[in-house]
Image (cartoon, helix red, strand yellow):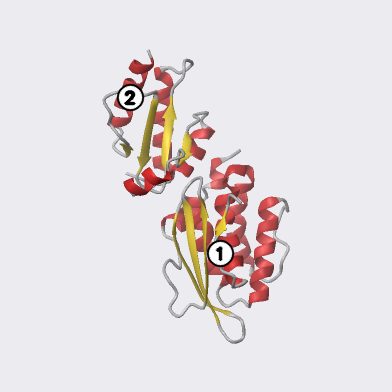
Amino acid sequence: MKKELIEYGQEVLRKNNSVKIIGNPKNKGGVLSFTIEGVHPHDIATILDEDGVAIRAGHHCCQILHDKLEIPASARASVGVYNTKEDFDQLNESINKCKKIFDLK
Amino acid sequence: MNLKELYQEIILEHGKNPRNLGKTDNFNKDAKGNNPLCGDNVHIYLKLNDQRKVEDISFEGSGCAISMASASIMTDLMKGKSDNEAKEIIEDFLGMIKENPELKSNILKEDDKTKLMCLSGVKQYPMRVKCATLSWHTLVSAMENDGKEISTET
């Protein structure tokens, strides 16, 4: 169930042309890390928070990896037993709100 | 809580196109600041002349819209100020962000005060206060010339 949900989430985010998903391992855990060009993860988190979407933003305890990827920080959505596909739909909608606020195409 | 209060036009504008970005020529004071938890970092450069006035000030850095906008607005306001005036403005701003309802100092012109008050929306978002104050604490370190690296997590 978690696997199906993460795959759904990945598809939703993949279709969003401003979202860059980080990493594409064969065996995914229940997390999706991503960046949006032009919006710092800290700002993404604040805007998503207003819509009741809770994500983590920052280094996720791996600064070294972020240095290697040459990104200042990343955003991360994770799923638990309580999450549904609608949550990912809301995540996508809120990401689009970020784009609007920061005037991204 | 209102996102519009936090991400006002002026903040977005300064965040996207920060003023005074770069390294001041012949700077004589500088300091670095960073937030290890989220990746905001800033390096403030300034040139104090013999009359101890801020002849030039600039910053390099990367981070969220709030941290960049705050550094941009700060460097704009500080140009031409004496070091004592600068310290008073910094104290005033930090007081306003943390608890005071408004800016108290009379050093700033009205429209500069208005610009600075745009950052007051941060008060509603405690997690973002560190973003807004990073460059200001770093400027204090630069002016005190110990140039000690500032971290939000000490």
**For numbered disc 1, what is the local secondary structure?**
helix
- Residue at image x 69%, y 55%? B96
Task: Between residue A33 and residue B129, name the one nearer to us.
Answer: A33
Left or right: where A39 falls relative to B53? left
The image quarter in which residue A37 lies: top left
Q: CA distance from mark 1 to mark 2?
A: 44 Å
Q: Position of residue B80 (x, y in %)?
A: 57, 78
One can see residue A82 in this view: yes
Q: Quadrant of the N terminus of chain B?
A: top right
Q: Which residue is mark 1?
A: B74
Three-letter residue code for mark 1:
Met
Element type at marker 2?
loop
Q: Chain of mark 1?
A: B
Q: Describe residue B29's horizontal placement relative to residue B92 as left or right.
A: left
Where, by quadrant of the figure, is residue B82 drawn?
bottom right
Residue A27: percent from left, percent from top: 30, 23
